[in-house]
Image (spheres, coloured by chain):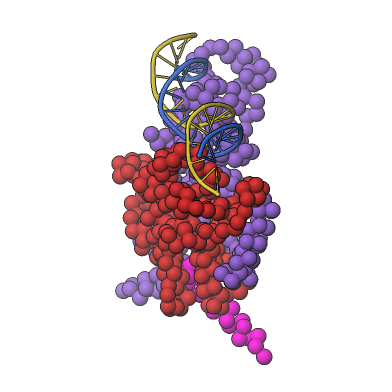
Chain colours: A purple, B red, C yellow, D blue
Amino acid sequence: MSSAVNEMQITRNRAKGGRRADAAARNVWLKPAPTPRDEPTLNRARIVDEALALLDSEGIERLTMRRLAERLGHGSTTLYWHVDTKDDVLDLCLDAIYGEVPLPEHTEGWRGEITFVLTGWRTVMLRHRWSTALVGRPMIGPNILARMEFLQASLLRAGLTDAHLAAATWGLYNHVIGSAVSRAGWHMPAEEREQAQQHLSAHSDRYPTLAAHGYMLDDDWDGTFTRSLNYLLDGIEAQIERGAARGIGRTP
Amino acid sequence: MSSAVNEMQITRNRAKGGRRADAAARNVWLKPAPTPRDEPTLNRARIVDEALALLDSEGIERLTMRRLAERLGHGSTTLYWHVDTKDDVLDLCLDAIYGEVPLPEHTEGWRGEITFVLTGWRTVMLRHRWSTALVGRPMIGPNILARMEFLQASLLRAGLTDAHLAAATWGLYNHVIGSAVSRAGWHMPAEEREQAQQHLSAHSDRYPTLAAHGYMLDDDWDGTFTRSLNYLLDGIEAQIERGAARGIGRTP
DNA sequence: ACCTGAACACCGTTCAAGT
DNA sequence: ACCTGAACACCGTTCAAGT
């Protein structure tokens, strides 16, 4: 059912061409391939790699099992040996790109660490814009778990506990997801954006603040993300200090 | 819901040819609605009401144009006189439920106001769980605009300007969206949740913090939302105070 | 102005059958 | 163990034709 749960690490090597081309080009010990038991022509890693290429180049609405299989040189029904459903493919794809989110190597304080991870996280999601349509599914792939683990461990070291630990973890995660999703929502042809802005101006009586302060025209998305992330981190930091003060008060 | 329906009756008398030409605009709100003359058996309000009922009772993957039309007692193709695409129906539905988000009647300070709106907003989205799958589209329906207007106006009165105003507005919006989306992601059969938790415990070497602090088992979602919202508001409040202090310093 | 059925060009998924 | 084609039960949308 939820084969997205399995622990297979998706390796993101883009093998161009596929098996047939490789078999023709490589040398002897791989060439007598007809031995059926050796290596299946298809596997999850190849399926996910090709799905990612398809998603990145054509978008999520163009990913169908038939088109994916065709790119892989198989009939669509073959995919169902390796994967239970199309949703499984999407779950695997989403976790695969989460693997691209870098984790800091040297600790630089919880705030720096967290800012580093979340900034990279958002960048990855906006690089693969289709990913914003896939949030809202259970997040238990190995790559997202590794990043949530890092995030929560960092907050724990910073001094948060219990409900505050959970609130800070989810608050920060929600911030990344929300930022990516809402930013992706504004990704439209410039002409349509013009229309939308006109629409807004035409109703400036109803939306005076939005019309006056450029609801549609804010294009410093990165700055907005960083600034609002800092508000959240400021609030968390204040909580950490409150917690520390109370801890000191309680020590015998 | 019916108020949302009133909102969408922005009528412009147009011949069919003209309407089709304007249909080049991709988003519902940017296209004129067709004008009913006598007493058509079908109209947008009826379509949206029925679509909402269908979404609420059966979920988003069960909403098809054919099933929707059947419930309305028509052939599926009839819908296309009133609406250009299925996506338009979904956009109309999403904005319709945003109309259920209450705005405070008496001002009670920016923090109280904003907490009130955002709490209601999240409640509405979780009441119509399908809505979390529809974020990530341009947000220019009348109901969401009214709420964004309220949010930004409140922050403006609180003393924010320029980039800080934008950052606070988007940060708060992202917080609601992110909370609703990620909470909806955990909405699964208890048995599957058990499996997921087991999976996590089985790899507690890799995810020690998550395993020890109940990543899967946190069920005080409301409390978590409120707490993390307060971190964000604390950070915004600190920014407001910084801005005020600088303003005082600058006054002659 | 509104509604219809037929038709087009697709979908995801199952399954008996092949090797 | 892996792959196949045929087939099922659907989709969203267009369009000539009706009233």
Is residue B246 on the magenta stretch? Answer: yes
- The answer to whether residue A47 is magenta is no
Query: x, y percentage for residue A23?
Result: 63, 18
Which region shows up in magenta?
Answer: B232-252
A230 is higher (above) or lower (below) than B219: below
At a point 52% along the width and 30% down the height, the residue shown is A65
Left or right position of B87 against B185 = right
Image quadrant assignment for residue A206: bottom right
Q: Quadrant of the N terminus of chain A?
A: top left
- Res. B40 in view: yes
Q: Position of residue A203 (x, y in %)?
A: 60, 67
Please tell me whether the stretch drawn in magenta is mainly helix, strand or loop. Answer: helix
- Residue B192 position by quadrant: top left
**Total numbered labels:** 0
Q: Position of residue A72 (x, y in %)?
A: 58, 25
The quarter of the picture where the C terminus of chain A appears is bottom left
| Image quadrant where residue B122 sits | bottom left
Going 45% across and 24% down the picture, which residue do you hit? Answer: A81
From the viewer's perspective, is residue A217 above or below residue B235?
above
Residue A165 point in image, percent of width and height: 40, 60
Q: Residue at x 51, y 58 (%)?
A: B8
Q: Residue furthest bottom?
A: B252
Residue A181 in view here: no
Nearest to the observer: residue A185 or residue B171:
A185
- Closer-to-camera residue (A229/B47): B47
Residue at 60%, 56% (x, y): give it: B13
